[in-house]
Amino acid sequence: MENKYEEFVSLINSSNNIVFFGGAGVSTESGIPDFRSVDGLYNQKYDYPPETILSHSFYRTRPSDFFKFYRDKMIYKDALPGITHKALARLEELGRLKGVITQNIDGLHQLAGSKCVIELHGSVLRNYCEKCHTFYTVDEIIASEDIPRCSCGGIIKPDVVLYEESLKTSDIETAVSLIRNADVLIVGGTSLGVYPAAGLIDYYSGDKLILINKSVTPYDNRANLLIHDSLGNVFSKLSL
């Protein structure tokens, strides 16, 4: 394993065109649970599976239940950036990282200082009235009761991509451009089982694909450097 750490450090130190594509594993070390691990949301008990609750149709038909779950399990106001968030922000500051593409909705990359962040699945920090499009903060969602409503009467919807909803075309186009032009592509903390996000990796044609994940993914055999470890442990090897 030590040789893999050294190779990782060498690849990062020798590139000025790095792109990072990450998932829930980036933020689990900040205390935010993922969906599919042993302690993840899919293995907790609710009246409905989390994937059902976080779907567009459930949001429409049972908004009260949706927001109860959403406030309880999707918002982590006290979470702080971890080692990986901070390392990525520092690499960007040094001009070596060109962008972060994330499936997370917690805003921790920006809190760590990252500027170019493509939030494929949106952010809990942004909320909009579906009727008049007035902006609301996450604090206002937390403080609201039952179904949050705007002064105009419209429902305030979190700016997150629910199951059954499409990713924003502009985000996909930007992510594809970053990946296509990357020298080094780091993929970390994601099971690579959620599409179309996972399919974005297919646009990388380079020979420096670094895949870091605790468990096996469908893309393991395509990685030029495969590390089965936590992101924090790997990124802590960098001297930035």
Image (cartoon, grey):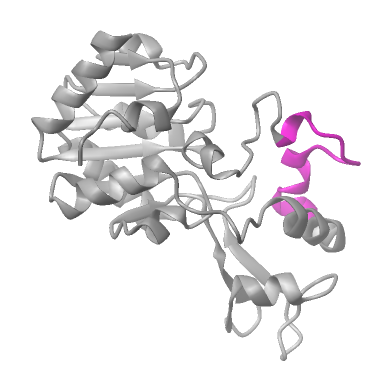
Q: Residue shown at 60%/44% (left/top)?
A: 32
Say if the magenta span includes residue 111.
no
- Residue at image position (46%, 38%) is 26
The residue segment tinted magenta is 41-59
Quadrant location, the N terminus: top left
Image spot of residue 178 (x, y percent) = 23, 44
Q: Confirm whether residue 179 shows in the render.
A: yes
16 to the left or right of 226: left
Choose between 47 and 29: the one closer to the eye.
29
Residue at 36 percent across and 34 percent down: it is 200
Which residue, as the protein is rendered here, is positioned at the far bottom?
151
Query: Would you identify the image quadrant in which residue 15 lies?
Result: top left
From the top left corner, tell me how far across and down residue 125 is, in percent: 55, 66
User: Quadrant of residue 154 in the image?
Assistant: bottom right
**Side (left or right) of 182 relative to 60:** left
Residue drawn at x 74%, y 32% is: 42
x then y, percent, for residue 121: 51, 50
| Depicted 216 relative to depicted 98: above or below | above
Q: Nearer the viewer, residue 53 or 5?
A: 5
Query: Which quadrant, please, contains the C terminus?
Result: top left
User: Is residue 223 at all visible to an observer of this figure?
Assistant: no
The verdict on residue 46 being magenta is yes
Q: Position of residue 191 (x, y in %)?
A: 51, 25
Name the residue nearer the viewer: 96 or 217. 96
Q: Position of 146 compared to 82: left or right?
A: right
Up the image or down, 171 lies above or below 16; here it is below
Q: Report the label total.
A: 0
The image shows residue 4, relative to residue 136, as above or below, that is: above
Relative side of 200 to 4, left or right: right
